[in-house]
Image: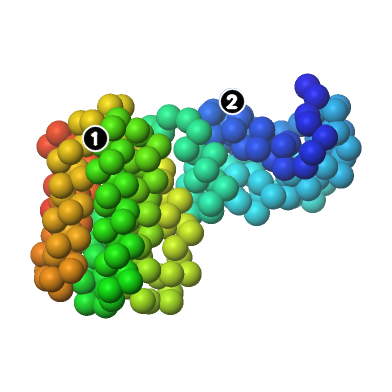
């Protein structure tokens, strides 16, 4: 299989990552040696070695001296790594992983909304309102890409409105996780997302009016209602205890 010459090592990395994530290369499996992979991909051993090192750094494989690399189980993957989340987004996720993604968002985002309600300034509110208008336009005109752009921009603005440098440092990973979540829970026909857009406007109003408790609850409702579309109709009991 001929790999494009531009950024050869990255191409090998991405192809092997997809094979691992799609189950073509199962956990515990020993990968072919560097020489075999170099022949298979028609690249140099150096490119293969670089690709394997990247996959190991992201937790997808384990490398041991004088042994073949082995595929790791999903529990060992660096799931907040931007590349890993991007590769996951290219395929269908199993429902258990989607559920755990919602759990992660429930732990973070209601508290992000709380801080935003406390700390948002006029610039933050303007950014949120602009994002909401994009969401509404995408919903009304059935433009999925526009809706997704607005949705992501709103959550970015929400994160910035916390004015917390540690949360901002986590921003890229959190944003990539949110983008993956959006893909799993968004309706195929975005014209059906009117209720979701309305919920985001209600959250915005709570933040604008500095209604801290209401902002937390609105964000929690947004996440739980999104989860209903994809993973369950009656939410598991554990979600009642994640505040």
Q: Residue at x 69, y 40 (%)?
A: 13
Q: Position of residue 129 (x, y in %)?
A: 26, 58
Q: Nearer the viewer, residue 130 or 104?
A: 130
Q: Position of residue 146 (x, y in %)?
A: 37, 40
- Where is the C terminus found, in terms of image quarters? bottom left
Q: Position of residue 80 (x, y in %)?
A: 48, 54
| Circle 2 residue | 24
Q: Which mark is residue 140?
A: 1
Q: Residue at x 20, y 45 (%)?
A: 197
| Element type at mark 2 | loop
Specify the quadrant of the image occupied by residue 71. Answer: top right
In the image, 79: left or right of 83?
Answer: left
Q: Earlier in the sequence, mark 1 or mark 2?
A: 2
195 over 238 or under it: above or below: above
Q: Which mark is residue 96?
A: none
176 over 168 or under it: above or below: above
| Element type at mark 1 | helix
Calculate the distance from the C-alpha at mark 1 to the C-alpha at mark 2.
Answer: 40 Å
In the image, 108: left or right of 27?
Answer: left
């Amino acid at each position: 299989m001929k790999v494009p010459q531009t950024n050869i090592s990255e191409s090998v990395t991405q192809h092997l990552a997809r094979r691992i994530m799609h189950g073509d290369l199962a956990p515990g499996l020993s990968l072919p040696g560097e020489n075999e992979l170099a022949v298979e991909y028609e690249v140099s051993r150096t490119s293969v070695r670089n690709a394997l090192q990247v996959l190991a750094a992201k937790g997808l494989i384990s490398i041991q001296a004088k042994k073949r690399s082995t595929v790791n189980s999903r529990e060992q993957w660096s799931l907040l790594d931007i590349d890993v989340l991007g590769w996951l987004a290219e395929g269908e996720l199993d429902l258990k992983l989607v559920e755990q993604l919602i759990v992660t968002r429930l732990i973070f985002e209601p508290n992000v909304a709380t801080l935003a309600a406390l700390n948002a300034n006029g610039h933050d509110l303007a950014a949120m309102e602009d994002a909401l208008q994009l969401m509404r336009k995408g919903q009304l005109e059935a433009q999925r890409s526009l809706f997704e752009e607005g949705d992501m921009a709103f959550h970015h603005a929400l994160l910035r409105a916390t004015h917390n440098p540690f949360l901002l440092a986590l921003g890229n990973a959190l944003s990539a996780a949110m983008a993956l979540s959006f893909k799993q829970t968004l309706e195929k026909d975005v014209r059906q997302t009117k209720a979701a857009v309305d919920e985001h406007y209600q959250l915005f109003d709570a933040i604008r009016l500095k209604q801290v408790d209401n902002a937390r609850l609105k964000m929690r409702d947004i996440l739980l209602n999104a989860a209903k579309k994809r993973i369950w109709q009656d939410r598991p009991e554990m979600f009642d205890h994640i505040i």
